[in-house]
Image (spheres, rainbow, N blue to C red):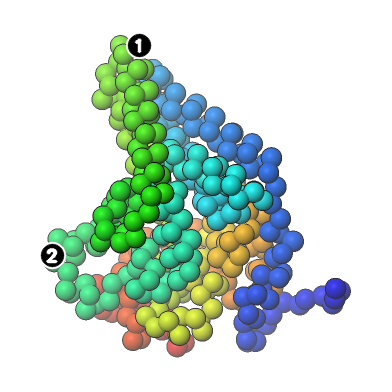
Amino acid sequence: MSTTAVLPIPAAAPLPHRKEIRQWLVPLSTRTTLYPILLLAFDSALLVAALAGAVLAEAWWLRVLCGLAAGFVIGRLFIIGHDACHQSLTPHRRLNHWLGRIAFLPSLTPYSLWEVGHNVVHHGYTNLKGFDFVWAPHTAEEFAALSPWKQRLDRTYRSGWAPGLYYLVEIWWKRMFFPNRRQMPTRRRVFLLDNLLVSAFGLVWLGALALVAQTTGQDFLSLFATGFVLPFLFWTAMIGFVVYVHHTHTEVHWHAERGEWSRSQPFVSTTVHLSFPAGVGAAMHHIMEHTAHHVDMTIPLYRLKQAQAKLEQMLPGRIIIQRFSWRWYFDTARRCKLYDFTRGCWTDYAGRPTSARLAA
């Protein structure tokens, strides 16, 4: 094996092939078994504690706070399931399948349908129009052809205030929870079984709330609100926000032609590393170190921080690094409304360019 040191690639040099870039990350793709299981157990215990507070705390504000915390922990569990679905959580394929299904239960996410929509479509064709459907922007012509209701809905989704509504309707309801043939033409037995599994979990969850209401003499609707609706809505807002900021940025481009998309090295150019103050990234299981994840999906969440740092060291000036602020977020939402594939830039709803052109 060669011991020659690999030096950072200058910004003006051609980008190396993906296989070469992944070689830099090979030492960070090793997986372990015990740590992910303990992590899943820890987050599951956190969720039970948060849900208990959401239905048993005396103060209403504490119940609301615990309900929001439960939604955040559902997001943490989902990220663990996301890794398992990529076969990056542990070295054992069958174990990953079951750990992923368990971790996905509180978010009511059918494992096999997520695997197809996310692993195959989103990762296989990131930001390729007509293939990747996640937060895919309309062109001005497409937007003009929409009904007034759908135009209003698109404006709401991209306002910055409703990423949860987008995920709840466009991803979970239409494509995950018993999708129709228009949304999922392929029918597999495992799709139905996974939907029945999450439905059964949801019924058990509701049954537990009904039991608590009966034994404590509380109103079921109030427990339903703080112990089910609030956590689930917070979770959808969290995942909608995360997916939006991963791939929506004035420096991130979409592509309409497959050859052009392939030449753009989409595994590097279509993702954002969103950095947060100390502790926030770790609390989200480092899901925001997203460039490393798209370069190599086999890197586990507990090594993503190191992998992202390695990429940024080796590819200076190539990776979009954005420090999070609400000002940046809402400015992005204001500017990234439609996409002009001819000019290769984002536009507002009036068609005015709001980002640099792709050729630049």
Return the residue at label 1: 215
Q: Is residue 358 visible?
A: yes
Q: Position of residue 78 (x, y in %)?
A: 48, 45
> Pointer 2: what residue?
148
Can you give x and y, in whole percent of width and height, for residue 117 in the image? Answer: 41, 59
- Up the image or down, 29 lies above or below 173; here it is below
Q: Residue furthest front?
A: 189
- Residue 232 visible? The answer is no
Lateral position of residue 350 relative to residue 63, left or right: left
The residues bearing labels 2 and 1 have C-alpha atoms spaced at a distance of: 49 Å
Q: Quick check: 5 left or right of 196?
A: right
Label 2 packing within 10 angstroms: few (<14), some (14-19), many (20+): few
The residue closer to the viewer here, 181 or 222, is 181
**Numbered disc 2: secondary structure:** helix
> In which quadrant of the rendered view does residue 218 lie?
top left
Percent of width and height locating residue 275: 55, 58
Residue furthest out toward the left: 148
Residue 51 drawn above or below residue 106: above
Residue type at the position of mark 1? Thr
Which residue is at a point 34% across and 30% down the rendered structure image? 203
- Residue drawn where x is 71% and y is 59% of the image: 28
Q: Is residue 120 above or below residue 72?
A: below
Secondary structure of the residue carrying tag 1 is helix
Q: Position of residue 134 (x, y in %)?
A: 37, 63
The residue positioned 28% from the left and 24% from the top of the image is: 222
Instruction: For marks 2 and 1, give the one nearer the viewer.
Output: 1
